[in-house]
Amino acid sequence: MGASRVGRLIGYARVSTEEQNLEMQIAALEKAGVPRSSIHVEKVSAAVSQRPKLSWAIESLREGDTLVCWKMDRIARSLADLMRRIKQIEDSGANFRSLTEHIDTTTPGGRLIFHVLGALAEFERDLIRERTRAGVKAAQERGVRVGVDPKLSPKQIAEAQRMRDRGQSVYKIAEH
């Protein structure tokens, strides 16, 4: 960290659909001191990995700047994604601030809280993964078929094999 200059406040606001409204987030960012002209907005789902406005906002950060968002989930779709983006911000000498969670990496306490929250979220994700694996194993032991249903019936598979054995092309088999 150790930013030596006080920099700009750069805001980022995101909603998932065109129907949702950004105004609440923008108002909160402005109230926190972010100039309207420095707020980057996107209407894109959290599941989408490409967020050009967020990428541009992070890439434009200089030492001492702070990226401000209304809530942490606005900038990341997973803990790993959040940690990667925070590392990008820190590598540029900038800071991160989330208004809802009251996390501000410009302070030692804010950095500590951010990392503790990150560790807790990772722990929770690992527990969920462990429980899911145990549940799948228990279901399989009870004879429950787990996974995606086959797209072809056994009859269709046998027909495709017969066609292949007769020298039909993959294209013809798929078309059939």
Image (cartoon, rainbow, N blue to C red):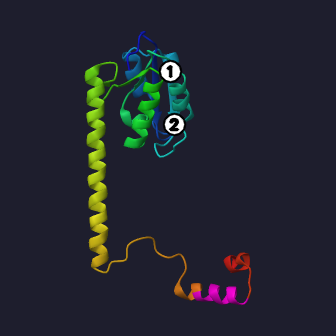
Residue 21 makes an appearance in the image: no
Residue 133 location (% of width, % of height) = 31, 64
Identify the residue shown where x is 31% and y is 57%: 129
Query: Depth-wise, is mark 1 or mark 2 nearer the camera?
Result: 1
User: Is 155 situated above or below 2?
Assistant: below
- Picture quadrant of residue 112: top left
Q: Is residue 162 shown in magenta?
A: yes
Residue 121 location (% of width, % of height) = 29, 43
Instruction: Tell me the amino acid under the disc marked 1.
Output: Leu
Nearest to the observer: residue 172 or residue 122 = 122
Quadrant containing the N terminus in the rendered view: top left
Residue 82 location (% of width, % of height) = 40, 37
Count of residue discs: 2
**Residue pointed to by mark 1:** 61
From which residue to which does the magenta span run?
158-166
Q: Main secondary structure of the magenta part?
A: helix
Q: CA distance from mark 1 to mark 2?
A: 21 Å
Instruction: Tell me the amino acid under the disc marked 2.
Output: Lys
**Residue pointed to by mark 2:** 43
Q: Is residue 122 shown left or right of residue 26?
A: left
Identify the residue shown where x is 56% and y is 28%: 56
Mark positioned earlier in the residue sequence (1 or 2): 2
User: Is 130 situated above or below 110?
Assistant: below
Residue 32 makes an appearance in the image: yes
